[in-house]
Image (cartoon, helix red, strand yellow):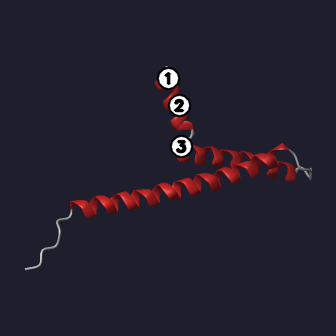
Amino acid sequence: MNKLFSLADQILKSPVTQFLIAVMLIYGGTSEIREDYQKAQHAISVHHGIALYGIIMIIRAGIALVKAIAGFGKVHAAVTNKKSPPDREA
């Protein structure tokens, strides 16, 4: 059971999952804002906060994804430098 909870925790804390949730929140919030604007209800309500939270989440997930991509580049560089034979001068 602990393995299941650990797997669920890893999935939920993944930057990709956070990015997808943020996109859904932004989409839901902006569609409600657009609907209110079309009905001429110019008031701030919950969906404004949802859209704002989605924007914050997408920024956080983007930063985590950029860090992960940069980490892949460093690992790749380290692996390729280790496997390449040293240059021998004749």
Q: CA distance from mark 1 to mark 2?
A: 10 Å
Residue 71 seen in the figure: yes
Instruction: Please identify, in this view, whether the residue under mark 1 or under mark 3 is nearer the observer.
Output: 1
What residue is disc 2 on?
8
In the displayed orientation, state which residue is furthest to the top. 1
The foreground one among 74 and 50 is 74
The kind of residue tagged 1 is Asn
Precedes in sequence: disc 2 or disc 3: 2
Q: What residue is rendered at 64% in x and 56% in y?
A: 59
The foreground one among 7 and 43 is 7
Neighbours of disc 1 within 10 Å: few (<14), some (14-19), many (20+): few
Name the side, left or right, on which 46 lies relative to 2.
right
Precedes in sequence: disc 1 or disc 2: 1
Residue 32 seen in the figure: no
What residue is disc 3 on?
14
Task: Give the structural element (helix, strand or loop) at label 3.
Answer: loop
Precedes in sequence: disc 1 or disc 3: 1
Circle number at residue 2: 1
* Residue 6: percent from left, percent from top: 50, 30
The kind of residue tagged 3 is Ser
Q: What residue is rendered at 55% in x and 53% in y?
A: 64
The kind of residue tagged 2 is Ala
* Residue 33: percent from left, percent from top: 81, 50
